[in-house]
Image: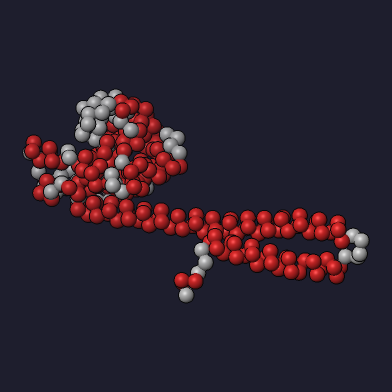
Amino acid sequence: MSRWRLSAAGRIVAVYLVVSVLWIVLSDQIVAAVVSEGSEQVVQSYKGIAFVLVTAALIYALIRQHSKRLEAEAQRVEDAYDQTLLGWAAALDLRDRSTAQHTERVTLLTVSLARRMGVGHDELMRVRRGALLHDIGKMGVPDAILTKPGPLTDDEWVQMRQHPALALRFLDGIEYLRDCLDIPSCHHEKWDGSGYPRGLSGAQIPLQARMFAVVDVYDAVTSKRPYREPMPRDEALDLIRQGSGSHFDPDVVEQFVGLVTEGPALAAGPLGRD
Ligand SMILES: [Fe+2]
């Protein structure tokens, strides 16, 4: 059965052919039956124009219908991509048990911050995907280091600090994620150039990563850990302000403080669960 299914282009051409043949066969007979002798010439001219208009409208409707079907299909594919990313993020949170739901919270807050800073719709999608995958590179860090209860040794820190570079290696071959790597690869860079892995500074650090860095630290200190209680909001904001111009982009800090202090609904939502 499916071997004989017409493609969209084939269906459009088939409909066009059927309408054209019917028009040729029937229109002359209708004109002859309805129009009086003498005015046939004029009607024949209008008939040609009517044919062009009718077939143009028909083809337009068919193409539009097909485009809508393609758009719906593209949206389904996008949704499937996002669901895959959510699965990866959940797997990461599960592995790194001390930061349960960390990924969900930082993603929501980073997207809110980006929206506040005027980031456009397409870019927001990249921010969201990048935030979901920010620590995907930790998949390459051994459990003994990732879940170690005590402080890391110097050698272990060297391995832990590989995770932004590992994220690049993991994701660079995935075409639809290639535009979403700013956060996974640069979220530990610092405004003054003292971060890692590349020691970028100021505007060299992609804006997405500068925004995410603030959110990531804020979420870390306001979350409960086995070895400490969560820091109160105002204390955490003071800590963020102290990092303005050294760890963080001052403009981003200003916008972030505004977002958290002016948006009680947001702060009480996903951020308020720990
Ligand atoms: Fe990280």
Name which residue lies at 60% across and 65% down. 14
Relative to 48, say whether 105 is above or below: above
Residue in the foreground of this view, choosing between 256 and 230: 256
The residue at the point 58 percent across, 56 percent down is 63
Tell which of 20 and 125 is nearer to you.
20
Q: Position of residue 229 (x, y in %)?
A: 21, 43
Give the side of residue 14 with respect to residue 240, left or right: right
User: How are the residues colored?
Assistant: secondary structure
Q: Is residue 228 left or right of residue 207?
A: left
Query: Along the line of sight, which residue is nearer the eye, 156 or 48?
Result: 48
Q: Quadrant of residue 190?
A: top left
Classify residue 34 as left or right of residue 127: right
**Splitting the image into 4 quarters, where does residue 182 fall?**
top left
How many numbered marks appear?
0
Q: Is residue 266 visible?
A: no
| Residue at 44% across, 42% down | 122
Residue 69: % across, % down = 52, 59
Q: Residue at x 28, y 31 (%)?
A: 240
Instruction: Give the image location of residue 206, x and y in percent.
Output: 33, 33
Residue 164 is situated, as x and y percent measured from the top left of the image, at 22, 40
Mark yes or no: residue 249 visible.
yes
Q: Looking at this view, name the residue that lies furthest to the bottom.
A: 1
